[in-house]
Image: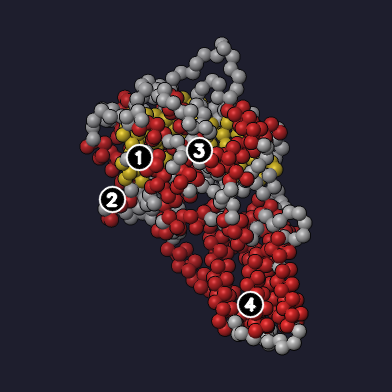
Amino acid sequence: MKKGLLKILLTFLVLTLIFVLQKPVFMLFYSSIYSSFGAGEWLGVLTHGFAMDMTVAGYLTVVPALLTLIAVLTGFDLRGRVMRGYYLLVTLLIAAIQLLDLMLYRYWGFKLDTTPLFYFATSPAAAFASASTAEIIGGTVGLIALTTLYYLILRYTAGLVKLQRVEKKKLLTGGVLLGATALLFIPIRGGVTVSTMNLSRAYYSSVTVLNHAAVNPAFSLLYSATHQKKFDSQFRFFDNAEAERLFSESLRREVADSIASPMPLLKTSRPDIYLIILESFSSHLLPVQGGEPIAMKLDSIARDGLLLTNFYASGFRTDRALPAILSGFPSQPTTSVMKFVEKAEHLPSIAGALGEQGYSLSYYYGGDVNFTNMLAYLINSGFTNIVRDTDFPLSQRTGKWGAHDHLVYERCLADMSRNSGTVPRFTVIQSSSSHEPFKVPYKNTRFPEGPLRAFAYADSCVGAFVDSLSHTPRWDNTLVIMVPDHLGAYPRNLDAMEQRHHVPLIMTGGALNRRGEVDIVASQSDIAATLLAAMQVDHSRFKFSKNIFAAETAPSAFFSEPDFVGYVTDTDTVTINLSTMEPTKEAPQSAVDDAKAWLQTIYTELSRL
């Protein structure tokens, strides 16, 4: 009996130690982030994440505890059969989770969740496209080495205690060992208080990166996986009627009768529309918005066209961005509506609304449209002509994400020249070359190889495309809209959430009636209502989308990341930490309530789709 108890305890302690030691390894790996912190902060990471480490260790100890109980009572030698297999599986999972968390944090800035699993399930090749060959090889070697190390540690620990079958007091022995197994419920639950273990238990500091280091990545992944459904029970701050009232009132403002209607956005009601979705761009690349002189073609287009200077990206990844841009459905922090094909098919879409007006509907992307269920979403949205990586010859698919941007634009121009009828066009072009690993077919002595060169290349491609369009016979009836897909990839050292999500919305074309800079707060989810209203097309199905230029519209922008949501108006900026559900800095309670009402309403609608 004592040996059985000791074996259970040792397994639990070793697993806990593995998770505890992962934290300083994580911080050393990201020494550029954590080197400025003293011993007190490092100790704080260990102590505040310890309970979560014990929770995961408790889950993983249940099976060895039950196998120990069986071995002691029956004498059946499970150590050489089931136990070794279990240890191998567990150590492989632990190593994979820790390495994924370690490798992805530099790109995402949040702890591991189910997002990479979703990406891998929909398109393994695209999921690995951001990684370099060295990273893939290093990750594979690291996975083998770490799995082997953890496995040997667990096997050695198991071998320290030799179990023997008990011949007497079997009932007592079984009861004690079963009780010890049941006691694992305490660390699994996170203690004996009312609150069960959740991500907020590791959050203790106003410095977000310290909280991230304290979070156990295995628990973060498990927590994310178990919160992908029952959306109507998530983020409940008010009763539904009150949330709906706050949300509805946040969209509108009182307007004096004397205020004149704004200048119409368009010269014509049925222009050809080209919506260009720019991978990872931000306002920080344009001098016209106070950024660096990198995207100079876009900068020139913005100065001659219409530029929204107070515009925000809804999410942090493309699968969150597309529904925001094309369906007016804001990004969700804990999931992506595109994960659920049966829900995404019920979203309204700009393409669907324009298809009813007789538009031809095309989508151009040089990558794999199966990635993140994109193809299903695009088809359900109404696109009938979808050009993808497989529509380009192998010789042109030289980028990690497929065909490079200039080839995609050239394909679109070639298709246009072959179809020169009178049917109005709605064409979406999604760029990809300015995505990690930032390898582009472009020489520019101003920028070394890396993200800046990739942005300069992508900028040159969109500039050449717009220039080519301007020389076509239909330019006078053409509207071009350019918007980044999500928060910017450059610069990476922005602390404020609203700065990371600050992106340009640029319009140009012969059909554009308004020009200059507009300082109205808006977001990607407002594109749908704004465009359709300018064309006098009904947009009532787009619940979260506002006509940016309508006098009665209250200017606001909602955006999200896995750890936070943000809400900006013309007077206030609110960011809410989703682990504590508290604002990160002082803000008016009315603005906090509006932000929470938006979040609750988004998840309520997600549950209804």
Question: For mark 1, what is the residue?
Answer: 383
Question: Mark 3 — residue?
Answer: 329
Mark number displayed over residue 495: none
N-terminal of the two: label 1 or label 3? 3
Q: Distance from label 3 to label 4 (Cα)?
A: 49 Å
Marks 2 and 4: which is nearer the front? 4
In space, the residues marked 1 and 3 are separated at their CA atoms by 18 Å
User: Do the CB atoms of the residues marked 1 and 2 lie less than 8 Å apart?
Assistant: no
Give the position of the N terminus as an image quadrant.
Answer: bottom right
Looking at the picture, how far across and down is residue 543, in whole percent? 52, 32
Counting residues from the N terminus, which is met first, the one under dot 2 or under dot 3? 3
Residue 347 placement (x, y as % from top left) = 46, 39
Q: How many marks?
A: 4
Three-letter code for the amino acid on which mark 2 is drawn? Phe
User: Residue visible at 67% across and 75% down?
Assistant: 65
Q: Name the element at disc 1.
A: loop
Foreground label between 1 and 4: 4
Q: Earlier in the sequence, mark 1 or mark 2?
A: 1
Which amino acid, by three-letter code, is at mark 4? Leu
What kind of residue is marked 1? Phe
Label 4 crowd bin: few (<14), some (14–19), many (20+), radius 10 Å: some
Q: Nearer the viewer, residue 126 or 62?
A: 62
Which residue is painted at 49% across and 32% down in the image?
Answer: 542
Q: Are marks 1 and 4 in contact (CB under 8 Å)?
A: no
Give how far apart the Cα atoms at labels 1 and 4 are. Answer: 55 Å
* Label 2 or label 4, whichever comes before in sequence order: 4
